[in-house]
Amino acid sequence: MTRPALNVPRTAVVIIVHGRHRHLQRQLLSLDGLVTADSILHVVVAMADSDVAQLVARAADGPVDVAHRVVVELPVGEDAELPLAAARNVGASAGLEWGADLLVFLDVDCLAHPDLITDYRAATHGGRASTASRDPEPTHNPDAGRASAASRDPVDLTGPILWCGQVSYLPPLPAGVADYPLIDLDSWSAPHSARPVLPPGAIQLTRDVRLFWSLNFAVTARDWHASGGFHPGYRGYGGEDTDFARGVAARGGGLGWIGGAAAFHQHHPTSSPPWQHLAAIVRNAHVFRDRWGTFPMEGWLEAFAAAGAIDYRPDDGILELTADPPPPHD
């Protein structure tokens, strides 16, 4: 793995994956189209998925220098739960070892806007001084009460900042259409209704980290070290994002919502609450409570409890499975 010239900005894009091979192929194509002066390293962390290395090697036949794309293999424990938190840490370490001064974390389901890196680079260079008096208010779904909190608390932050780009959602591909048109994703997609949407170039800082998610965010190398990274005690789905953001807030940091750095989430079937992850969510909720004193993912836990799958009494610190969860699946 070659290092770029010392005077060239270095960005590592970290992707963690198990399965989702078609989504990864499309994502790598979108990353090939990034418009930036940065030297880019794509770090693909394959969690117990030996097919990823070959897929990435085939993608390297395109316009991207193979030296700037690396696959890191990460095994899965005996419980077969994907080590999502540990995988992000491994990807970050690979990027930092290469010399990255900016880390961009992109969910494997997300396609990158051509200006993704340029927008993140602009925010990290001048965003710490941004305040509500200088930036327009974000728009959001008025029914999404938690989202409004992020727009009411803009402040200067002294700790690490997690820069959050826009995430829009793509519909299912119509019959007969093989791929999303990478040059026209804006017209195909709609922003998430419960996240702030800012005008292009605007920045909004907040100490309220409750809306953080890892689908699309960036952090400088310095702030990554200051954040402590993701807690490796989380295994499987749920809680690791919330814990990471909580740790950032505890260190005097917060979120930086930006107008731009857009990613487009490819459609796939979902369930809410995510029943296939019930056991992992319950286990990880206990990890979070042991660290922070409260249970996270309240909406999902309440839904599981209403369905009779768990005994959930947060005031008493009780959270237990009451029914066998369905077998895990992708």
Image (tube, rainbow, N blue to C red):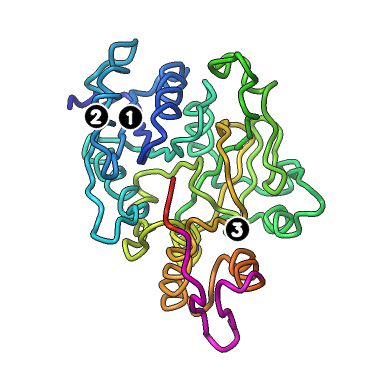
Residues under numbered marks 2 and 3 in contact, where contact means CB atoms less than 8 Å apart:
no
User: Is 320 within the magenta?
Assistant: yes
- The dot on residue 42 is 1
Q: Nearer the viewer, residue 190 or 228?
A: 190
Q: Is residue 71 above or below residue 205?
A: above
> For the residue carrying disc 1, how many other residues have a C-alpha within 10 Å: few (<14), some (14-19), or many (20+)?
many
Looking at marks 3 and 1 on the same chain, the residue that comes earlier in the sequence is marked by 1
User: Is 327 within the magenta?
Assistant: no
Tell me the mark number nearer the camera, choosing from 1 and 2: 2
Relative side of 301 to 121, left or right = right
The location of residue 239, given as percent across then percent down, is 47, 62
Looking at marks 2 and 3 on the same chain, the residue that comes earlier in the sequence is marked by 2
> For the residue carrying disc 3, how many other residues have a C-alpha within 10 Å: few (<14), some (14-19), or many (20+)?
some
Q: Nearer the viewer, residue 244 or 224?
A: 244
The location of residue 206, given as percent across then percent down, is 62, 55
Q: How far is the residue under mark 3 from the one under mark 1? A: 32 Å
Looking at marks 1 and 2 on the same chain, the residue that comes earlier in the sequence is marked by 1
Identify residue for label 2. Answer: 53
Identify residue for label 3. Answer: 273
Residue at point 60% right, 58% down? 273
Tell me the mark number nearer the camera, choosing from 2 and 3: 3
